[in-house]
Amino acid sequence: MLRVRTPKVTLYVDRSRQQWVVLDQSGRFWMLPNVENPWDQRQPIYPTEDMELEPIPGHYRYMLGLPAGGEERDA
């Protein structure tokens, strides 16, 4: 049986605001402030047309203190 690992969060940068944005597994977006532990102080946001979200590679997750790893499920 094949095991698939799904990420807990997807990381973006909003180029229009120069801000980190995270999409969680539940489909909610969060803005990460420029502080020492941004994940602990995240703020909910709602995507707008003027946002310029660009996907960022997952290895930046650790730098921002985001949840590591993911969930495993059968495929």
Image: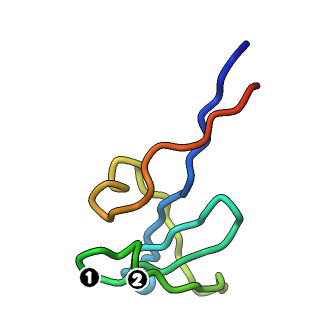
Q: Residue at x 58, y 84 (%)?
A: 44
Q: Residues within 10 Å of mark 1 (few under 14, many from 20)?
A: few
For the N terminus, the image quarter is top right
Q: Which residue is mark 1?
A: 35
Amino acid type for the residue under numbered disc 2: Gln
Residue 50 placement, left or right of 14: right
Which quadrant is home to the C terminus? Answer: top right
Q: Residue at x 70, y 32 (%)?
A: 73
Q: Is residue 43 left or right of residue 59?
A: right
Q: CB atoms at circles 1 and 2 under 8 Å apart?
A: yes
* Image position of 3 with respect to 66: above or below: above
Q: Residue 49's spot in the image, x, y percent?
A: 66, 84
Q: CA separation, marks 1 and 2?
A: 8 Å
The structure residue drawn at horizontal position 31% and vertical position 54%, both measured from the top left corner, is: 62
Q: Amino acid at mark 1?
A: Val
Q: Nearer the viewer, residue 58 or 36?
A: 36
Q: Please identify the quarter of the rendering in which residue 3 is found.
A: top right
Read off the residue under disc 2.
41
Using the rendered view, name the quadrant where residue 30 is placed. bottom right
Residue 45 image offset from top left, x and y in percent:
59, 85
Q: Is residue 30 left or right of residue 34?
A: right
Question: Residue 45 has which mark?
Answer: none
Extreme residue in the top direction: 1
Above or below 13: residue 75: above
Q: Quadrant of residue 34?
A: bottom left
Q: Position of residue 61 (x, y in %)?
A: 37, 56
In the rendered image, the vertical position of residue 75 relative to residue 68, given as above or below? above
SS class, disc 1 = loop
In primary-sequence order, the first of circles 1 and 2 is 1
Residue sitting farthest toward the left: 36
Q: Is residue 38 above or below residue 26?
A: below
